[in-house]
Image (tube, helix red, strand yellow):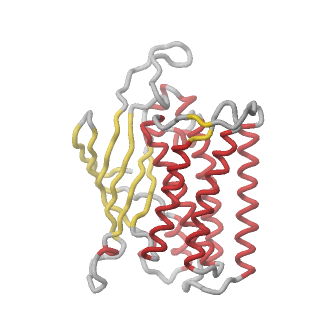
């Protein structure tokens, strides 16, 4: 399905942006005068990787797919909207990495905030355009809205507070659902990480110290996080009753899940190590395993000693 394809490409883009950030891992002070050499490196390297990603995407999904007139599809009800949370989180994260790269290049804070938002939203929009001309897919208005919300969250906080007090994050755990519909949910562990939305959880992680008086001794790196996910989904809309060989499969109730947990803001941990700063920024979109309280309509409140 389109959503799983989209997620796989976008996570690849995230890895690209993380690698690019390594160029600035030794920098401890933000600049305000543009370093043309660094900026050109960011533009050329980022463009090359993005074009390569789109080329792989074309030959992997579009080459043998008939083209048609531009059209939209209504996928707002797919996967109990877990995929929409994924779109917002991915757009937000790309925007954040874009901001760090632009600041490393000496672009001003305000311009970096706006340009990075265009980078995050633009990277997602190009794929929606390609989908819109594909007979098997179609552009999605709700995808575009989720992309805009993700990038907008980053830009708004950057302009308002010059920091990210609320971060969108991702976590994943393996489930048993993929065995019943591997063509949709993945046949290998890597495919399931990308395609099995039953194992995806998307988080809004809030930094507590950002809302406390500066003289407080409260640890700056402690966050509280609210999460959303779903389970029992073998298909975007309605679960099948038989597998690909015609054998009956269990019928699962499609259930939304809500979570409350603690988290860590890695970027608030002070260190003189350039390597650790690089690692911390690379981990900034990942929700750490912590004791978690879950609520869903099937089981009520459920406690997890460790949840990821």
Drawn side of residue 252 relative to residue 33, left or right: left
Q: How many marks?
A: 0
> At 39% across and 69% down in the image, what residue appears?
165
- In the rendered image, the residue lying farthest to the left is 301
Judging depth in this view, the residue of 253 and 115 nearest the camera is 115
Judging depth in this view, the residue of 245 and 294 nearest the camera is 294
Relative to 279, say whether 287 is above or below. Answer: above
> At 36% across and 72% down in the image, what residue appears?
221
* Quarter of the view holding residue 6: top right
Q: Position of residue 29 (x, y in %)?
A: 55, 86
- In the rendered image, the residue lying farthest to the top is 246
Drawn side of residue 210 relative to residue 276, left or right: left
Q: Position of residue 116 (x, y in %)?
A: 59, 67
* Quarter of the view holding residue 298: top left
Relative to 240, say whether 172 is above or below. Answer: below
* Quarter of the view holding residue 220: bottom left
> At 43% across and 80% down in the image, what residue appears?
270
> At 61% across and 37% down in the image, what residue appears?
72
Q: Position of residue 54 (x, y in %)?
A: 72, 49
- The quadrant of the picture occupied by the N terminus is top right
Judging depth in this view, the residue of 59 and 121 nearest the camera is 121
Q: Position of residue 301 (x, y in %)?
A: 22, 43
Judging depth in this view, the residue of 251 and 141 nearest the camera is 141
């Amino acid at each position: 399905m389109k959503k799983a394809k989209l997620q796989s490409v976008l996570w690849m883009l995230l890895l690209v942006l993380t690698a690019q950030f390594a160029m600035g891992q030794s920098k401890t002070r933000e600049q305000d005068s543009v370093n043309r050499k660094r900026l050109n490196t960011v533009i050329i390297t980022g463009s090359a990787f993005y074009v390569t990603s789109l080329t792989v995407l074309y030959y992997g999904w579009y080459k043998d797919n008939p083209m048609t007139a531009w059209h939209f599809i209504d996928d707002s009800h797919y996967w109990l909207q877990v995929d929409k949370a994924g779109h917002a989180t991915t757009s937000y994260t790309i925007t954040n990495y874009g901001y760090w790269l632009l600041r490393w290049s000496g672009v001003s804070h305000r311009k970096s905030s706006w340009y990075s938002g265009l980078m995050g939203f633009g990277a997602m929009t190009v794929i929606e355009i390609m989908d819109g001309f594909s007979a098997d897919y179609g552009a999605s208005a709700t995808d575009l809205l989720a992309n805009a919300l993700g990038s907008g969250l980053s830009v708004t906080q950057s302009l308002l507070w010059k920091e990210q007090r609320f971060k969108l994050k991702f976590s994943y755990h393996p489930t048993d659902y993929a065995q019943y519909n591997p063509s949709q949910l993945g046949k290998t562990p890597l495919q399931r990480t990308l395609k099995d939305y039953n194992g995806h959880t998307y988080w809004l992680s809030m930094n507590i110290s950002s809302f406390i008086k500066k003289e407080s001794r409260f640890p700056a790196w402690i966050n509280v996080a609210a999460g959303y996910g779903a389970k029992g989904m073998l298909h975007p809309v309605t679960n099948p009753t038989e597998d690909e060989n015609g054998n009956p499969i269990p019928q699962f109730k499609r259930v939304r899940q809500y979570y409350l947990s603690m988290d860590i803001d890695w970027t608030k941990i002070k260190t003189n190590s350039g390597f650790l700063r690089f690692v911390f920024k690379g981990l900034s979109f990942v929700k750490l395993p912590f004791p978690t309280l879950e609520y869903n309509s099937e089981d009520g409140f459920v406690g997890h000693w460790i949840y990821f």
